[in-house]
Amino acid sequence: MSTTPALELEGVHKSFGKLEVLRGIDLTLAEHEVVCLIGASGSGKSTLLRCVNVLEPIDAGRIVVAGEEVTGRGVDVNRIRREIGIVFQSYNLFPHMSVLENVTLAPRKARGLSRSVANGEAETLLARFGLADKRDEYPDRLSGGQQQRVAIVRALAMQPSLLLLDEITSALDPELVAEVLDVIRELATGGMTMLIATHEMSFARDVAHRVCFLDAGQILEEGPPEAIFGSPREERTQQFLQRIVAAGRM
Amino acid sequence: MTARGSSESRAVAIAVVSTFVVLAAIVVVVTQSPGWDEFKAYFLNWGYYSDSFEEIARAFLVNVKIFLVVEAIVLVTALLMAILRSLPGPVFFPIRALAVVYVDFFRGVPTILVILMLGQGIPALQLSWLPTDQIFWASVALVLVYTAYVSEVYRAGIESVHPSQEAAARSLGLTRTQALRHVVVPQAVRRVIPPLLNDFIGLQKDTALVSVLGIVEVLRQTQIDQAATFNGTYYLVAATLFVLITIPLARFTDWLVARDRRRQQAGRLA
């Protein structure tokens, strides 16, 4: 049994100018755990993920990934980022590269793999997620769902120990959401440690071991999905979930 | 189909007629001018044109050599300058400031002055280890000026690549330099090829300015011939040579722009 948590956040604060986006976040993820962050737009979900990946510097607190503090001085952020995959709402594929090149760029340049080894690994991953026939296509020839699946494969090609998903279905047409969520379900079954910001409540209930409700930069309530969705304690959580139900999103 | 076809052929007919009318008007005005006969003898002498063409074309090769070398160097130096100017953070402030001063200076001073200052000034230093070749210093002057112009083109391209592209590259563990080299710069360069070629057309014409140093290139050769015969037809020869080079490049640029637009539309339809 592993004792080192996959991810630990202690008192994380982050402001953009005068706007306090994160106001003291404490959160621990065990290995193989899947945690969903829910909450209204602007509650700090995306910022939290970007801070974990050191895309945003934090103002106070500590972030520890697999026992190593990423927010300390003199930390090699490039090495840390190789351990943490992130997938964005807007895919952010490289438009001037084919699917295969998108997936193999980081393994070749950051992991130092040869082209043939990187291609082999990429083709295995693409096949696993039903994208084998798209390897030579360019991103703008793919549907949104296919692009997002390529973005997930691109993150997985770095063999991360932790995967961050930032509202990865929010930019998709409704009929394309399922194919992307299926990929995440498969990863959860396979034991991938994931921190997921999402608006898909039924998906969160389905896949998460734990759900955290973020409100105004703080984790107001957390617990197993049955508890959060079934009998939320906090009034703000109840209001949020009622609005979601009223909007037909649950 | 027939309605569209007839309106198209109507448009063509109108274009042909109006072009013909305008040309005819110009021909009439010019040929009826009081000095037309003298003008014709001075500028449009076919004998001088055909006799001098080969000699002037040979001198034009000097211009071609200069712009080919200068273009190849500027492609690299301007990109470096643009990257220096895009370096983030307070540490790089001095480098950014120097790059801004450089670009401001060499865009602000007339090219002909830079050529004169380098071409006459540096040999005057009498430093034996420096080259004294005038073509060398004229080329250096053109590199300095066009590096400033073209670096601004590159910089616009780099800034047009959305920051999320760099974020995606960095999030995969690539270093800043790797993200720049493999993700940002390739996209930036693709976008700026048309304005970049536009600057190169300007550079090709500006090679005529090196004649102020006495280098026998196309303009100087033309002036020598004109002074010997008191006939201006040679100017027309030089103009012909420039146009033979610059017009294909301009059409090529148009074709690249049109191709990119077609590709983007094809991508969106898919």
Image: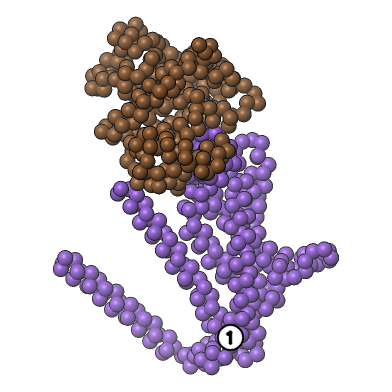
Q: Colour of chain A?
A: brown
Of residues B254 and B39, which is closer to you in this image? Answer: B254
Q: Left or right? Give the position of B155 relative to B114.
A: left
Left or right, residue A134 beside residue B239: left
Answer left or right for B144 relative to B24: right
Q: Nearer the viewer, residue B125 or A54?
A: A54
Q: Between B177 and B257, which is closer to the camera in this rendering?
A: B177
**Secondary structure of the residue carrying numbered label 1:** helix
Question: Compared with residue A30, is residue B157 higher up or lower down, i.e. above or below?
Answer: below
Q: Residue furthest left?
A: B2
Query: For mark 1, does the 10 Å Cα neighbourhood hold few (<14), some (14 to 19), or many (20 or more) residues?
Result: few
The N terminus of chain B: image quadrant: bottom left
Q: Colour of chain B?
A: purple
Above-or-below relation of B122 to A10 = below
Label 1: chain?
Answer: B
The answer to whether residue B148 of the structure is visible from this angle is: no
Using the image, determine if residue B238 lies above or below residue A97: below
Please name the residue that numbered disc 1 is placed on: B54
Residue at left offset 43%, top offset 86%: B30
| Kind of residue at badge 1 | Glu
- Residue at 29% x, 20% y: name it: A202
Residue B37 at x, y percent in the picture: 48, 93
Residue lying at 45% horizontally and 46% vertically, measured from the top left: A97
